[in-house]
Image: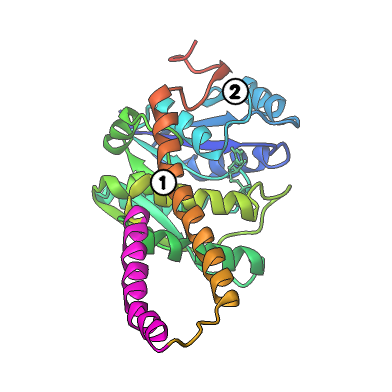
Amino acid sequence: MSKKVSIVIPAYNEQDNLVAIVDRLENIMEGRSYNFEIILVDDGSKDKTLSVIKAMTLARKNIFYIEFSRNFGHQPALKAGLDHADGDCVISLDADLQHPPELLVQMLEKWEEGYEVVYTRRHEDRSLPYKKRVTSSLYYRLLNSLSDIEIEPGTADFRLMDKKVVDVFKEFNENEPFIRGLIKWMGFKQFAIDYTPNQRFSGESKYNVSKMLRLAMHGVTSFSIKPLYTAVYLGFIFSFLSVLYIPYVLHALYTGKEVDGWASTIVTIVFFGGLHLIILGIIGIYMGKMFLQSKNRPNYIIRSSNLVNLV
Ligand code: UDP
Ligand code: MG
């Protein structure tokens, strides 16, 4: 029996990309000794994504779809695909052809060599918009300095995972899973492949700066409580500084010199007001996560699917 490869593609408003990517994938997989299936997850798209997908499932029998009840986001869509893939390995990639499907060949070779996770690293590419390059490099720097796991720059959700890894991942029940972090955290034998991303085939990126920032904060607070320690250290530093200030104040009092300090008082109040709010906010984020996790809601809701294990 030849091995089975599952390919998972989350799609949100990707009507013009899906036929192209499925064709490319089929060209690559054809003539190889694998069985393969493609699982397309429609993340509550507002365009014709779903009908394009359904048309493809009618024409070919190794294409499956999962339709969400609304837009849940990229990570939940990816998780749904992984949860329902039953291949000996699972490959995930974006629908917009930025992740070159041709890399699958190399990924599969590495998998056959015994690697359990084959992930990809995007070269910093001049053709990428400047904003995207800067935000992405800032993002990883922030993430790694504040977090307990090391995530390499340029790693996105374009990777191959052995069934063993996927089976462990399926057991996770995290609210808002940060998948690239979780996979890194899990360990196993991992191998990195470098690649240059393509331009988006059609449509627009769904990530903007505020979404990226949210994902970054989420990445940090999902994996470490370092920010809470930062708050404590800041507290120590400022208490210490204020102690240093005491002799100066005493001296001024003793010598009867008037301490002129309207401006410095205002600045201090504003500064510490801000600092307190930031720290309260950090504590709040962790509490919010506990609140969301305690409700134990599912990551996504499926409206329909043609997967056998779902109908
Ligand atoms: N995506 C999704 N749900 C969303 C946003 C994005 O399933 O709410 C999918 C999207 O269709 C694509 C992938 O996630 O396949 C990556 O999104 P995008 O290309 O917009 O992100 P970028 O490449 O700009 O980081
Ligand atoms: Mg993209």
Query: Measuring 35% from the left and 60% from the top, which residue is drawn there?
Result: 230
Q: Label 2: which residue?
A: 67
| SS of the residue under disc 1 | helix
Ligand 1 neighbours mark 1 (CB distance < 8 Å): no
Q: Is residue 26 above or below residue 237?
A: above
- Predominant SS of the magenta segment: helix
Find residue 166 and report its image quarter. Answer: top left
Asked if the magenta segment contains residue 46, the reply would be no
In front: 225, or 261? Answer: 261
Magenta residue span: 227-255
Query: Measuring 37% from the left and 79% from the top, which residue is drawn there?
Result: 245
In the rendered image, residue 307, in percent from the top left (x then y), is placed at 49, 18
In front: 193, or 143? Answer: 143
Q: Label 1: which residue?
A: 283
**34 left or right, relative to 18:** left
Find residue 32 and report its image quarter. Answer: top left
Specify the quadrant that holds the N terminus: top left
Residue 99 visible somewhere in the drawing:
no
| SS of the residue under disc 2 | strand
Query: Measuring 73% from the left and 47% from the top, which residue is drawn there?
Result: 203
**58 left or right, relative to 234:** right
Q: Is residue 127 above or below residue 44?
A: below
In the rendered image, residue 43, in percent from the top left (x then y), is placed at 61, 31
> Which of the four quarters of the rendered structure image does ligand 1 lie in?
top right
Indicate which disc residue 107 carries.
Answer: none
Asked if the magenta segment contains residue 229, the reply would be yes
| Sequence-first tag of 1 and 2 | 2
Q: How is the image coloured?
A: rainbow
In front: 297, or 100? Answer: 297
Nearer to us of marks 1 and 2 is 1
